[in-house]
Image (tube, rainbow, N blue to C red):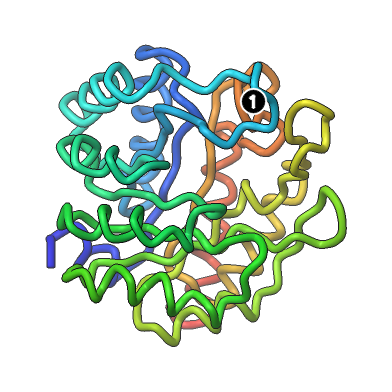
Amino acid sequence: MTNLYSEIKNGLFLISGPCVIEDQDMLLRIAGKVQKITDELGIKYIFKASFDKANRTSVTSYRGPGLEEGLKMLAKVKAETGLPILTDIHEAYQAAPVAEVADILQIPAFLCRQTDLLVAAAKTGKIVNIKKAQFLPGNDMGHPCKKVTDSGNDQVILTERGTMLGYGNLVVDYRNLVDMTQFGFPVVMDVTHAVQKPGGLGGKSGGDRGYVPYLAQAAAAVGVDGFFFETHENPEEALSDGPNMVTPDKLKEILKTIIDIRAAIGK
């Protein structure tokens, strides 16, 4: 077990950063701002950004700088801040090169049943964050977990990001958070993706960040230890997921409330 996974298993932690890599300076600014907040509040912080958003709604949507350039940019964030790095992989061949930079490999929700992807991630020896598919209940996440553990890796995180309700909307059933704890791995509430409305803006996804504080507060009351917030300095100008992201200042307010709720329930 790595020291990072041990820390994650034993306290409050945050996964945060922009949805997709836009430029190097932006990555470093956001990482620095959020790191300052988490240092002040005593929260373990993992920086997140994607080098490629392979599942964008439209073929014309911005996807990111790609694997090679994206990893260089994430490596610079890691070198200059000392923060652990999380990023997504979409194909099995990406696991090994991404593991040279990232501390946590994330399996996107749509791909959480992809056996080859899970096995490749597991074999890197890095922590594997499996996002629960929008079409699966929490109880079914034992199967993706087993694909990773049977491949020799017990360092798993499970993340809730909402469930499809009808067309173009997500809901959060907090029973899924409780159900996923049965597998013995840290559970994360991905708050900003849970307010997403897939395809809600025609050629791209919409959402409503106004619900973010409420979903975060409810997850804190349930007792989860991990929180995932995509963060941007100017969400309205973001190249991906802008309607759902929060600013660092807003993130700080929400994190303070989470800490208060956790204290109230004895966490």
Q: Name the residue rendered at 65%, 16% in the picture.
A: 60
Q: Which residue extends farthest bottom?
A: 182
Q: Name the residue rendered at 75%, 60% in the picture.
A: 164
User: Quadrant of the image for the C terminus?
Assistant: bottom left
| Left or right of residue 65, residue 166 in this image | right
Q: Which residue extends farthest front?
A: 116
Q: Position of residue 46 (x, y in %)?
A: 33, 46
Q: Name the residue rendered at 27%, 53% in the picture.
A: 121
Amino acid of disc 1 = Pro
Q: Is residue 194 above or below residue 57?
A: below
Q: Looking at this view, is 69 or 196 the one in front?
A: 69
Q: Quadrant of residue 161?
A: bottom right
Q: Name the residue rendered at 44%, 58% in the picture.
A: 114
Q: Quadrant of residue 244?
A: top right
Instruction: Please tell me whether mark 1 sits on a helix, a strand or a loop.
Output: helix
Q: Position of residue 218 (x, y in %)?
A: 66, 69
Q: Looking at this view, is 265 or 168 the one in front?
A: 168
Q: Which residue extends farthest right?
A: 166
- Mark 1 neighbour class, 10 Å CA radius: few under 14, some 14 to 19, many 20 or more: some
Which residue has dot 1 on it? 235
Q: Position of residue 69 (x, y in %)?
A: 30, 16
User: Quadrant of the image for the N terminus?
Assistant: bottom left
Q: Position of residue 194 (x, y in %)?
A: 67, 53
Q: Looking at this view, is 236 or 119 the one in front?
A: 119
Q: Is residue 146 above or below residue 131?
A: below
Q: Is residue 211 above or below residue 145?
A: above
Q: Quadrant of residue 57?
A: top right
